[in-house]
Amino acid sequence: MITDEVLMTAVKSGNLDKASDLYNRYSKRLYNYFVKISLDRDAGYDMMQNTFLRLIKYRHTYDQDKPFQAWIYQIARNVFADHLRKNKVLYSDYQQVENLGELDSSESDEKYEQERLLDKSLAKLSDEAREILVMSRYQNMKYEEIAETRGITVAAVKVKVHRAIKKLRVYYFELEKI
């Protein structure tokens, strides 16, 4: 299998057909990332599309010596920041986020309720804390990749993840009592 870095180097060199391979690999992951941090499915789709448009537009800035995933998520973070500035919306209030996958009939109501509480708890976190948890837990990014994407140290990522999980746990158990 061709690595992401090789594909992006080809895109950078003008072979734009290879961008479709990157789209196939990353579109669903980026969509999920945007939905989890923005709590808006439609905006998530738009931001995912915008990320790939910027991939093409700014392909000349890609450094083939660095991981592609960190580069694409940096673009995604910039797209989200632009979205927030443009819409001047704070996502502090919970908005119901539909499940991205259909619930299997064998899944219990309890599991659905746990996911709903987790989504509500995530919505209560600050944008930064929610983003760091989405990257580490939902996108399965390594701390090193998150550090490179955010321009901070690995130690800082670990501290931020720890604090975000601690706060998420508090919110979750508060909501569970209601």
Image (cartoon, rainbow, N blue to C red):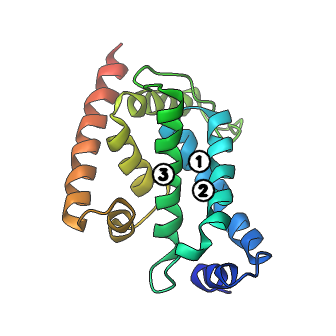
Identify the amino acid type marked 3. Answer: Asn
> Does label 3 or label 1 sit earlier along the sequence?
1
Q: Can you name the residue that lies furthest to the right here?
A: 17
Q: CA distance from mark 2 to mark 3?
A: 16 Å
Helix, strand or loop status at disc 2: helix
Q: Which residue corresponds to mark 3?
A: 78
- Residue 130: x and y in percent read 38, 41
Above or below residue 101? Residue 17 is below
Question: Foreground residue, 146 or 52?
Answer: 52
Q: CA distance from mark 3 to mark 1?
A: 16 Å
- Residue 80: x and y in percent read 51, 44
Which mark is drawn over residue 29?
A: 2
Helix, strand or loop status at disc 3: helix
Q: Which residue corresponds to mark 1?
A: 32
* Image side of residue 152 versus residue 100, left or right: left
* Between marks 2 and 3 in the image, the one whose residue lies nearer the viewer: 3
Name the residue at 56% across, 23% down: 96
Identify the amino acid type marked 2. Answer: Arg
Asked if marks 3 and 1 touch (Cβ < 8 Å), the reply is no
- Residue 78: x and y in percent read 48, 51
* Image side of residue 101 versus residue 115, left or right: right
Name the residue at 53% across, 33% down: 86
- Which image quadrant: the C terminus? top left
Name the residue at 43% across, 55% down: 135
Question: Foreground residue, 21 or 11?
Answer: 11
Above or below residue 73? Residue 106 is above
